[in-house]
Structures are given as structure tokens and as C-alpha cells.
Image (tube, rainbow, N blue to C red):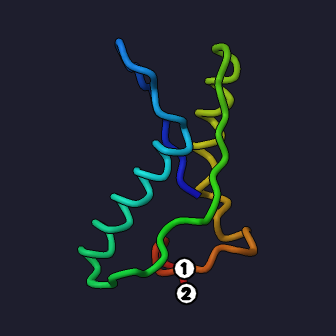
Amino acid sequence: MLHFPVTARFAGTRPPPLSEIVRALKTFSARRINELRSTPGAPIWQRNYFERVLRNERELVAAREYIANNPAKWELDGLFTDRAAVGTQ
């Protein structure tokens, strides 16, 4: 699972819906990744996404800790299949 923070400001214009921002990110990054891998059209992203608004410092600290500690748990996830990415077989 990929986590990344997004902060966006749209001065003087109506911002696009978050779904459009995520769609564009997934589209452009998947094309570039597949270009680099020579795997045109291969799926890169899961179909949906989860959004979370962090409303205070406590929530921000908890999110940062989760993001920092989550990779250590990947191999315990039943959906995790890319063992080569973490150097295990």
C-alpha cells in the first residue's frame, strides 16, 4: 500500500474533485512506470483509494507512525505478493 501526503491550494479557481486528482495521479504514474518497465497496460494501482483528512497534530503523528511502521508488516498481509521487492522469496 502506498501512502503519500497531498496538500493542494487552488487560488482563484474551483478545485477539481479529489477523485479527479487521484485518477490523474494514477493514470500518469502508471503510464510512466509501465514505460520504464516495458510493460504497457500492466495494472499498477488497486482500483479504489482511501482518503483521510488529518484534522489535528495528534492525527498527523498517528498517521506518520502508521506510514513509518507499515512496511514491516507487508509480508503478513495475505494480499502481499511482491516478495522480490523486499528481498525475500
Q: Foreground mark, 2 or 1?
A: 1
Mark 2 = which residue?
Answer: 89
**Residue located 62% across and 47% down the image:** 69
Q: Nearer the viewer, residue 58 or 34?
A: 34
- Quarter placement of the C terminus: bottom right
**Residue located 29% across and 79% down the image:** 37
Q: Is residue 28 left or right of residue 87?
A: left
Q: Amino acid at mark 1?
A: Arg
- Quarter placement of the N terminus: bottom right
Q: Amino acid at mark 2?
A: Gln
Mark 1 = which residue?
Answer: 83
Label 2 or label 1, whichever comes before in sequence order: 1
Q: Are marks 2 and 1 in contact (CB under 8 Å)?
A: yes
**Residue located 69% across and 23% down the image:** 59
**Residue located 56% across and 44% down the image:** 19
| x and y percentages locating residue 13 in the rendered image | 38, 19
